[in-house]
Image (tube, rainbow, N blue to C red):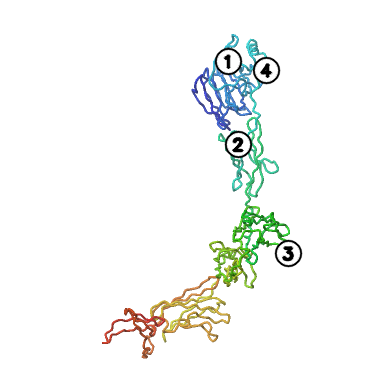
Amino acid sequence: MKTVIVKVNSATQTIAEHQVVTKDGQPTVIKATHNVNYELIDQATGRAPHHIVTKRVGQDLHVSVEENGQDSDLIIEDYYDDADSALIGLAEDGNYYYYVPDTGEVADFVTELAPGDIEGQALGGTDYLAPWWVGVTDQAGFGILPWLVGLAGLGGIIAAIDNSGGSSHSYVPPVVDTTAPDAPTATVSDDGTEVTGKAEPGSTVSIKDKDGNEIGTAVADAEGNYTVKLDKPLTNGENITADATDADNNTSDKTPATAPDSSDKTAPSAPTLTPSNDDGSVDVGLPKDAKEGDTVVVEGTNEAGEPVKATLTKQPDGTWKSDNESFVPSTDASNPNTSTIPENAVQDGSDVTAQAKDPSGNTLGPVTVKAPDNASTDTPDTTAPDAPTATVSDDGTEVTGKAEPGATVSIKDKDGNEIGTAVADAEGNYTVKLDKPLTNGENITADATDADNNTSDKTPATAPDSSDKTAPSAPTLTPSNDDGSVDVGLPKDAKEGDTVVVEGTNEAGEPVKATLTKQPDGTWKSDNESFVPSTDASNPNTSTIPENAVQDGSDVTAQAKDPSGNTLGPVTVKAPDNASTDTPDTTAPDAPTATVSDDGTEVTGKAEPGSTVSIKDKDGNEIGTAVADAEEQLYC
């Protein structure tokens, strides 16, 4: 289906315009106008259809602009009442030509057709600068219509007219375009479902696979844009070609294009760079998980101050091949994943960077260090970095944290085996990718080693435990009205490392908390013995909050938790009233200490926790009071 514009041109201007849509089952019907040219314009190309089929039906002219010519797309009614109008169009060379018959017979020109005749017509003959109608031309005393002049020769036309169109004469062939279009551009979309680009307007773009099989076509629009929809997406780096064929069957050169490769999104691990202050060299640690064809690009500055670069490529035998042996040598089987930049191959104090890359374009890095000073006589740095922080990700695939910038962080399992390394960036951030995810509560350590080979203390971390989703049983809290204490029942099914957190309010009205941790021997160890004491083997799963450690009537809560974060509780009770049935306390507290501040605004000291301290002047008048806190400190 195509859209063709029909302009009706007089001797000076366009006086009407019609639209023809092919293959829609509805021909466009217009009334004939005398002394005009009917200009045909293909909307997709901005030029005339190169070939049409004409048929005379009574006094009407039927025109098909499709190659097969089966259907009438345009009907000009009463065209042959006075056949003084012609069909004209703009060719690729920028000139206008009348449509002339494929046969070369004068009798087959559009204006000369007999009823029932069907003839193919193409642009040809004499070229014109404009599509305006030109009247009868006087040639050797004969009135000749312009579209006949110069096509069969004046003598031939006269003879054909004298013989009522019965003679056959040759004519000047139609203009034939033999110039191939420029090669189109071609880009495969990210999802591999289409190829887009630019081509000659109206040309047909063909997309072929690496074996030359056509996998899609499209026609470039009037702006030259085209889009080829692909039945099967290309997402694995496939190689394709695109070419353009114009209306005269001229085909351009092929344009290669490559589909995106979505099969590999994982880069190898980052390389490491370790300066050596012993001799000024830099060790290059190459990723052990790299695959054949992966590369590490190392860049720096040589002793002459010029940029220098080496690309090391992973070989089938596990070694790395360098393209600049004097800067970063190739490795061998004895130490396949380590190379060393010699001290005289890099400028002292200059930056050295390294980045890993795989054939799919995935990268990790770059990492950067300063090349050490070959001639340094400074006292070596013997101060270890601070211990790094370390957190295992929820999926157990990486360890992240903070360390001294430039330090190499080493992650080790519980047996001390190194399971991953990374270099902290300029902000001190690091990420260690783990080959084997840790998801079962594994214990690891992280340490940081600086450029002078000083190693920090180890930082412990625990991986998430995806296998444990069950919390220990809830603890119990039982108030005792006998003495105002609260019994804490600790879960018997708890495992080593499980905890119970007990919270409440002390006699001074301040919040207080104790965490009890299950020990290997089955007892529980408290971090606040005065609030909730540790247990012993005689009664391992019960502790008691003393009556004077909790405020009467206040809430006491307890919650169990395991190292995987599973919890049960909290449970809550009210602390009983110590004095409800207790024998009254008739023992006076110890005398407090007392010190007046230098500016005389306050008195501080120590007293029985929870007791009220009264300050009196020399005459016994009370001039201030305060309650001693849990630490026996008071302020007035």
Q: CA distance from mark 4 to mark 1?
A: 18 Å
Mark whose residue sits in front, 1 or 3: 3
Name the amino acid type tagged 1. Leu
Above or below, 574 relative to 236: below
- Please give the residue where the numbered disc 1 appears in the rendered image: 145
Badge 4: residue crowd in 10 Å (few <14, some 14–19, many ≥20): few
- Residue drawn at x 32%, y 81% as measured from the top left: 625
Which quarter of the picture shows residue 242?
A: top right
Q: Secondary structure at mark 3?
A: loop
Q: Which residue is mark 3?
A: 334
Q: Nearer the viewer, mark 1 or mark 2?
A: 2
Disc 3 marks which amino acid? Ser
Labels 1 & 3 near each other (Cβ < 8 A): no
Query: Which circle's residue, 4 or 1, is located before the other in the chain?
Result: 1
- The residue under label 4 is 170
Query: Is 140 drawn above or below residue 334 in the view shown?
Result: above
Is 556 in front, or is 92? 92
